[in-house]
Image (tube, rainbow, N blue to C red):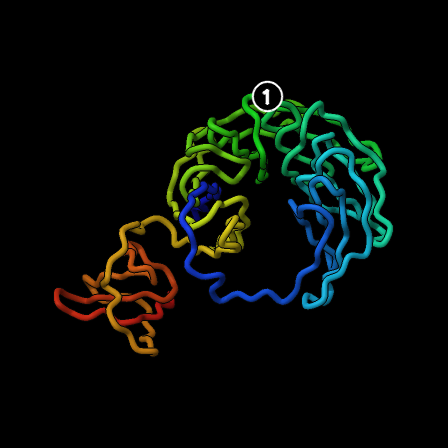
Amino acid sequence: MRCAVTFVVLLLSTAASAQDSLNCRLPGTCNTPGYAKAVAVVDSFACVANYDSGFSVVNVADPTDPFQVGCCSVPGFAGAVTAAGGFAYVGASSGLRVINVADPANPHEVAFCDTVGAVGQIVVVDSLAYASGGKRDYCLVVFSIANPSAPVLIGHCDTAYANGVAVAGNYAFTGAGHSGLRVINVADPSNPLVAGWRTVGLASGVADWGSGVRIIDVQNPSNPTEVGYYDTPGLACNVTVAGTLIYVADHGPGLRIIEYYGSGIEEVTSDERGAMGAGANLMRRLPQGAVSFDAMGRRVLNPASGIFFVKSGTGAKPVRVVLAR
C-alpha cells in the first residue's frame, strides 16, 4: 500500500473572526508570569516557557482548576519547550536550557548549551534533540542529550534561519523565513544536509507567514509538493496533527480545527448546500454522477468518509449525507 506523507505549513492572514469559538469550550485557565510562549504537557503537568519570565510547571490534573506548582528563572527569553524523561528542554535566546522537572514543585536548570544565538522550536527523538535556529544563518541544530546534564551540539545546517522544526524518520522539516520549507536529511545527525525545499511564503518555523494553512506532500523529499491549503482568519502561529484533523494556534481568533480530506477540494464556496433539515442519509458510496460539497460549500472531488451535501442532478436539491466507506 502506498502511504502518503504530508507536512503542514501555516501562513498568516489578517481577516477578523466573527465569533469567539465553535464546538469548543474553555474549562480553565492559569495565569503564569510574563507571556506564555510555548507549552509541553507530560502526564498531569504542563511545562510553560514564559518568554521574559522564566519557566513554570502547572498542574493540569483537573482541567477546570489548573495551578502553578513550580517555577525557575531562564537566562534570556524562553520561547520554546518540549519535555521528555523527567527533563524539560527550553529554547531560549541564550541557547538550549535543560531543566530537571522530576519534582514538579522544584524545577531547576541542570545544564545548558550555548549556540551563539536563539534556539526555537525543539523536537526530541530518542537521545537527540532537533531545534530550529541556534545562529543567524542556521535552520537546524542537533544536540546529543544522551546525558541530559551535559548536552552537546553535534551538527547543524546553515542554509537559512528558521523558527520551528518537525522530524519524521530520517528527515527534519523547517520553515526558513523567505526561503520557505526546508527538507533536511538527518540520517547522519552530525552532518544534516538539505534534501529539498519549497517556497510557500514567509515561513516561521513549521508555521508559515503568508496566507493560510499549506499542506505539503514530502513523499519525495527532494521535491516537496503542495496538495492543499486553507486560509485561516487570524495569524496562524503553530500546528499539530491528529489523523485527518489539523489543530491550528490562530493568533487572534484562537484555536482552529481543520479537516484534511486529501486532494480534490475546490476552494471556491457555493450556495449548493441549500436549506437542510436535521437528518442525514447514510451511504456507502455516492450515486453515479452525484456532486458533493463540504460544510463550507466547497465542491469535494474525491470524498472519503464524513458528512457531505450531495446533489444528484441538474435542478435537484442537495441532501445531507453521512458517507461511511
Judge the density around disc 1: few (<14), some (14-19), many (≥20) Cα neighbours within 10 Å: some
For residue 315, what is the image quadrant? bottom left
Q: Is residue 148 left or right of residue 264?
A: right
The C terminus: image quadrant: bottom left
Between 129 and 112, the one lying in front of the other is: 112
Instruction: Please give the name of the residue rendered at 19% of the width and 70% of the height, measured from the top-left corner.
Output: 317
Decide if residue 125 is in sight here.
no
Between 74 and 154, the one lying in front of the other is: 74
For residue 134, what is the image quadrant? top right
Between 177 and 319, the one lying in front of the other is: 177
Instruction: Please give the name of the residue rendered at 76% of the width and 60% of the height, measured from the top-left corner.
Output: 67
Above or below: residue 214 compared with residue 136: below
Q: Is residue 76 left or right of residue 16?
A: right
| Residue 34 in picture, x, y percent from top left | 70, 46
Above or below: residue 105 compared with residue 130: below
| Residue 267 in picture, x, y percent from top left | 30, 49
Instruction: Please give the name of the residue rendered at 47% of the width and 26% of the height, measured from the top-left corner.
Output: 179
Mark 1 highlights which residue? 137
| Residue 296 in picture, x, y percent from top left | 33, 59
Between 31 and 177, the one lying in front of the other is: 31
Going by the numbered disc 1, the residue's amino acid type is Asp
**How many numbered discs?**
1
Q: Residue furthest left?
A: 314
Q: Secondary structure at mark 1?
A: loop
Above or below: residue 121 compared with residue 182: below
Decide if residue 179 is in sight here.
yes
Instruction: Please give the name of the residue rendered at 33% of the width and 69% of the height, measured from the top-left corner.
Output: 284
